[in-house]
Image (spheres, rainbow, N blue to C red):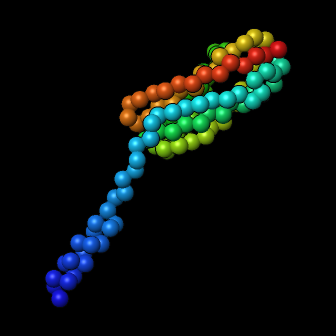
Amino acid sequence: MKRLLVAGAAILSSACGPATLENLPLQISVEAAPATAAVGDTVYFIATVQGNSLLGLNVDFGDGAADSYGTAGARTGRVTFRHPFVSRGTYTVKITVTDGDAAQKAASVDVQIL
């Protein structure tokens, strides 16, 4: 009887072991909606990200304003930032994602404020 229990425990142990997750390449894309807006209108920026252990995103709106969002180790995410621009011009908005593997990747999009 002891042998049967030991063998059963060994089977359960290997079947319930930690799952291994496939490595995901660090990627980010960003889009603006709308890409052309009037002064004072809110522009939405949607960042789509993936990685192994995402720590957070930082956004530079190109007009001196910035924002950030923590992702607490997620592997994928879709984060929306919003920002009103108070002056006319073309702004390059850059969003940078940081992964727990000490890696960073950035993507940018231009918006025109009329």
> In the rendered image, is residue 20 in sight?
yes
Q: Nearer the viewer, residue 8 or 38?
A: 8
Residue at 20% over, 83% down: 4
Residue at 78% over, 16% down: 113
Q: Nearer the viewer, residue 14 or 71?
A: 14
Relative side of 48 to 104, left or right = right
Relative side of 1 to 81, left or right = left
> In the rendered image, is residue 61 in sight?
no
How many dots with numbers?
Answer: 0
Is residue 111 shown above or below 10? Answer: above
Expressed as whole percent of the image width and height from the top left, the position of residue 114 reads 82, 14
Residue at 76% over, 16% down: 112
Expressed as whole percent of the image width and height from the top left, the position of residue 96 reads 53, 26
Question: Splitting the image into 4 quarters, where does residue 89 fall?
Answer: top right
Question: Splitting the image into 4 quarters, where does residue 31 fall?
Answer: top right
Classify the position of the N terminus by image quarter.
Answer: bottom left
Q: Residue furthest bottom?
A: 1
Expressed as whole percent of the image width and height from the top left, the position of residue 64 reads 64, 15
Residue at 81% over, 21% down: 37
Expressed as whole percent of the image width and height from the top left, the position of residue 72 reads 48, 43
